[in-house]
Image: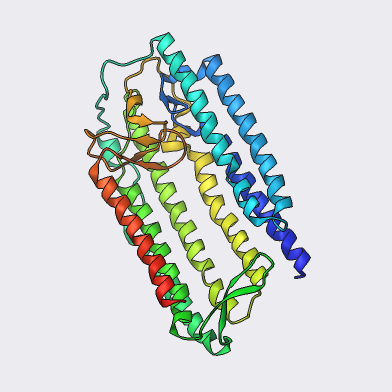
Amino acid sequence: MSPDLISLVTSASMALVTLLSGCLIAATPWLTRGREAFAVSVPETAQADPRIRRMRRAYLACTLAVSAASAVAALTLWSANPLAMAAVVCAPVAAGFLLMLAFRARVMAIKRSEGWGTRSARLSTVAGAAEANAPRPLPLAWDLLYLPVILATLALSLALYPAMPDPVPVHFDAAGVADGYMAKGWQVVAMPTAVQAFMALCLTASHWQILRSRRPSSPEHPVASAIAYGMFARAQSAALLVTGIVITVSIAIMPLAFAGVVTSDQSFVALIVIIIAAILPNLAVSLVYGQAGSRLLRRMTASSELGFDDDERWRLGLFYVNREDPSVVVPRRFGIGWAMNWGNPKSWGLAALLVAAIAAFVVLVEVLFR
């Protein structure tokens, strides 16, 4: 591939990644549970309120506009200013968050004026045998699939080691010119597998979060909501596993680049394509199931009662803080996936452990692989 074609493919791929992620953010109000609107607890019938419907449409239009503009900017800024391009890619996320905060305040004002409320902070529901037999996330044993990928990468590195130059180029600037080298040695073989092992541990921790999350249940539809959430959690765990395998396999590009089998530009293009391939399963699950399986419940009769309200537990609509809840992980209020319960000391311990693991990995790379 010519340098110009590689640059075009790279910039187009980054623009596509920006647009896809922006579209998912724009669709968030339609993917959340019927009992929530812009991170506020509301009756299910409130979703038909004209004011909330206008806010959803405005959120969609504004976020899509920012995403389209960011995609165009990413397409034009890649070769000229990669740093500015990186900031542009984050623009849809920032815009979606600010819009959510603005509309959240408006929904809370509507909630107060309409008198939507509940007499208790939580209503217990019993789904019985249906909940017990609901689909479950994939067992953690599935993460052992990362092991053969790591071993295969190690074998590839050993096979290519004789063809690697000395020193080995390990870092390239935006123009694809090598600007960082490593002495040829065992570190060159260990680096790809070390990165894979660290990524596998992080992805396994995410899988563990799904397994340990509190299973939400709708007081209006306890049986159906238990089944819907089980299907959502299982699909999300499968999508996470597919994404993780794709990411760890992509790290095998490192020894290929070290040995000169692929150029730096070609490897970067391959990584961008792999990132898109990793995004698509998660995008599909989000659009099909919705947050916590909400899209599977859309055809049911909406309730005008608000049997569950913990708005005061959600700071800025994103951060859950509840010292009385023993759960460490809970489904997100706005968005797809899960959030930590920052009122539980275990969450802070896990966060500290993650920060320590990242710091230790960075130090290990700096000390052993320089």
Front residue of this view, candidates 88 and 227: 88
Q: Position of residue 261 (x, y in %)?
A: 63, 80
- Residue at 44% from the left image edge and 53% from the top image edge: 240
Q: Is residue 162 above or below residue 289?
A: below
Please name the colour scheme applied to the rendered image.
rainbow
Q: Position of residue 327 (x, y in %)?
A: 26, 40
Q: Is residue 143 above or below residue 346?
A: below
Residue 67 can be seen in this image: yes
Residue 152 can be seen in this image: no
Q: Is residue 90 left or right of residue 35?
A: right
Q: Is residue 22 left or right of residue 297?
A: right
- Residue at 78% from the left image edge and 65% from the top image edge: 4
Q: Position of residue 50 (x, y in %)?
A: 56, 15
Q: Is residue 258 above or below residue 92?
A: below
- Residue at 72% from the left image edge and 58% from the top image edge: 79
Front residue of this view, candidates 332 and 43: 332
Q: Is residue 78 left or right of residue 332?
A: right
Which quadrant is home to the N terminus? bottom right
- Residue at 42% from the left image edge and 24% from the top image edge: 40
All told, the count of numbered labels is 0
Q: Position of residue 3 (x, y in %)?
A: 75, 68
